[in-house]
Amino acid sequence: MKTLSLVIPIRNQAHCVQRLLDSLAAQSIAKEIEIIFSDDGSSDDCAAVIQAWSRKTGLAATIVRSSVSGGALRARLKGYAASTAPYIAFADADDTLLGTTALEHACRLAADCDADIVHCRTRGLSPDGSVPLGELSWAAPYMECLEGEKIFHTFFASRVYPPLLIWSKIFSRRLLDIVVSHAAPLRIFRFDDKCLLMLSVFFARKYVPCDEFLYLYRTSDVWPIEKFSGRLRDLFTLQEVMQNLFSAHGTSRESVAVFREYMQRRIGINMGKMSAKIQEALASGQSFASILERTSVFLDSETLLRSILASCLYNTDKIEQAGALLHDVVRER
């Protein structure tokens, strides 16, 4: 049996997957990795690129194919279903693993500490791949071992943007079996990483940080209206899922409170960003009806209204501050 299963969703990424493949071959435990690509309805020759690399390096790579695209969450879950190793990691096809020994060290930590999650460091790369961005501080591990509910509470209480990202982490199969059973019925459009990580930090028994750089993440500059509307739909879905889990597992009030604060903030931020995109679209001459039609794929009228209300509540303090400033300016003039 292999030490680690690496699950990689891929869709029409033949042009960039070679970098990931080469970084895999450079790993000190390359022969102990079960490499699984979950092809989410590709129409290019990414499978041929993977197979050619496999023949050249002698490293086996399984390709699990779907005839039509089901989205990133479905692809990850399908890849996981084909995996067999006791530890699992995820990567994206346009990213890269760093160094040669970090992955080996992370797997050893997971085994030695009986950890459900080992969390490593991440560096960033500009969208075109030309500019190194240094360490992504918002993706950094919490530098202490955590157990039980403290894992969940720490993720949501310690940072404005907790590292709810599927990459740069090693997971135990015990944990992911539980996570997948809860994630499989969900319809998640954009936040597959947050879905899997929210569930992971909720059910994990032990979290261990690893002070090594494991992952090079290529950032994105593509932010269409549909992306934000899909995220909003996902946030409301995840909010309902987690609320049910809180009730079923007797989660402390403190942990529930910090989670709700985080969700209100994220819904408010995403609604604000979508509003800015709508304003840009209107300024370019698009009709409001056509814009709403684009968002309706993800957001029904009720969810859109809930998003607007949540955004207003999130921005109440800012509105009050702006009102006070306006009052002072009018009074002075």
Image (cartoon, grey):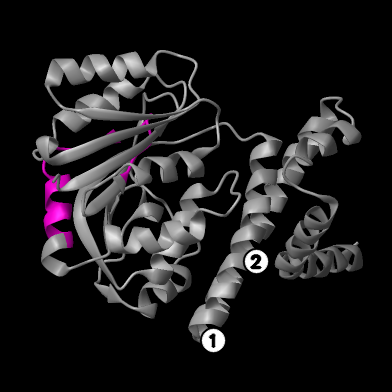
Image side of residue 228 versus residue 207, left or right: right
Q: Residue at x 29, y 74 (%)?
A: 146
Give the percent coordinates (x, y) of residue 67.
Answer: 51, 25
Dot 2 crowding, Cα within 10 Å, few <14, some 14–19, many 20+: some
Task: Judge whether residue 162 is colored magenta.
Answer: no
Chain part drawn in magenta: 90-110
Residue type indicated by callout 2: Gln
Q: Which residue is mark 1?
A: 253
Quarter placement of the C terminus: bottom right
Horizontal side of 198 relative to 247 (left or right) equals left
Q: Which residue is mark 2?
A: 264
Residue 257 occupies which quadrant of the picture? Answer: bottom right
Q: Quadrant of residue 305?
A: bottom right
The local secondary structure at tag 1 comes to helix
Label 2 element class: helix
Find residue 271 and report its horizontal and vertical position in percent: 71, 52
